[in-house]
Amino acid sequence: MPFPDIGSVAFTLGPLVIRWYALGYLFGIGLGILYGRSMLKRKSLWKNSAAPFTPDQFVDFAIWAVLGAIVGGRLGYVLFYSPAYFAANPLHIFQTWLGGMSFHGGMLGVLFAMYLFGRPKKANYLSSVDLLAAVAPIGIFLVRIANFVNGELYGRETTLPWGVIFPGGGDLPRHPSQLYEAALEGLVLFLAIRVVTHMFFGLRKPGLAAGVFSTGYGISRMLVEQVRLPDAHIGYLFGTDWFTQGMVLTIPMLIVGVILIIIGLKSTNA
């Protein structure tokens, strides 16, 4: 299957260059805020009808989410994937337009931003994180689609009929691992959490939705890492041809996810 060479730039406004990757982040956060507002308006979803925020307060969180995702995503990439390079070239840390963002770092950045945002409002932190878990797959879906458009983070060579010949990936078709992640970590995970929150009223059990997200993302990422190529400067770890840095960072998510599910299931439903 030929690669749809759309280009990494969505459009330009004079000297301002707008890239698909940036739009993925911005639209992901924007749509996530709208979806989160709709959930906050439904008091019946929450334990004792007490949502962690008002819908308007969650709109105010948008700028916090943007900053948390960008700063956390960049610092995560610096620390997790290229610490030696950036230690030698510290000014390059700020050159985000050249690429280099970490999902795990962005997740930690948004979680920290939520803590800072919710603390003065005395919001239940586990319920706040449940809300983030419900909206996060929207952004993940859009960013992974942007990864595909950019022709980056592609997978190993494949003979499957949907293999794609990526620019810079040689002449042989490869797994479109970005689309696998968009489907599993985005669409499937969104629907699974939607069932938990709206059919089984999982938001009444603080921590449950966050646990489902963490374990669901972890399982999906571990599966896709089997066909996704690791960063060239890191490669596979411990002398294997399958264990990657992405898997190292995902294992803690699986452990935390299971713990959160247990905490959520043990809480009383009201």
Image (cartoon, grey):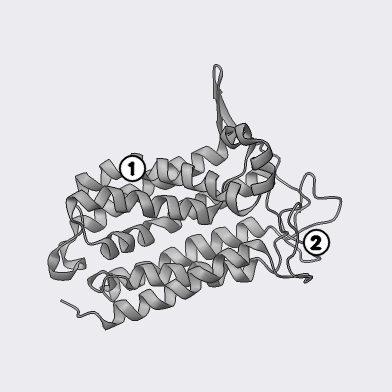
Apparent side of residue 108 relative to residue 101 in the rendered image (left or right)? left
Residue 137 horizontal/vertical position (percent): 45, 58
- The residue at which mark 1 appears reads as 62
Q: Residue at x 55, y 58 (%)?
A: 182
Quadrant position of the C terminus in the picture:
bottom left
Q: Residue at x 48, y 50 (%)?
A: 106
Q: Residues within 10 Å of mark 1 (few under 14, many from 20)?
A: some
Q: Nearer the viewer, mark 2 or mark 1?
A: 1
Classify mark 2: residues with Cα within 10 Å, few (<14), some (14-19) or many (20+): many
What number is the disc on residue 205? Answer: none
Q: Would you identify the image quadrant in which residue 61 lies?
A: top left
Task: Give the residue type at disc 1.
Answer: Ala
Q: As displayed, is residue 117 above or below residue 246? A: above
Q: Amino acid at mark 2?
A: Glu
Q: Quadrant of residue 60?
A: top left
Q: Which residue is mark 2?
A: 157
Closer to the camera in the image, 256 or 151: 256
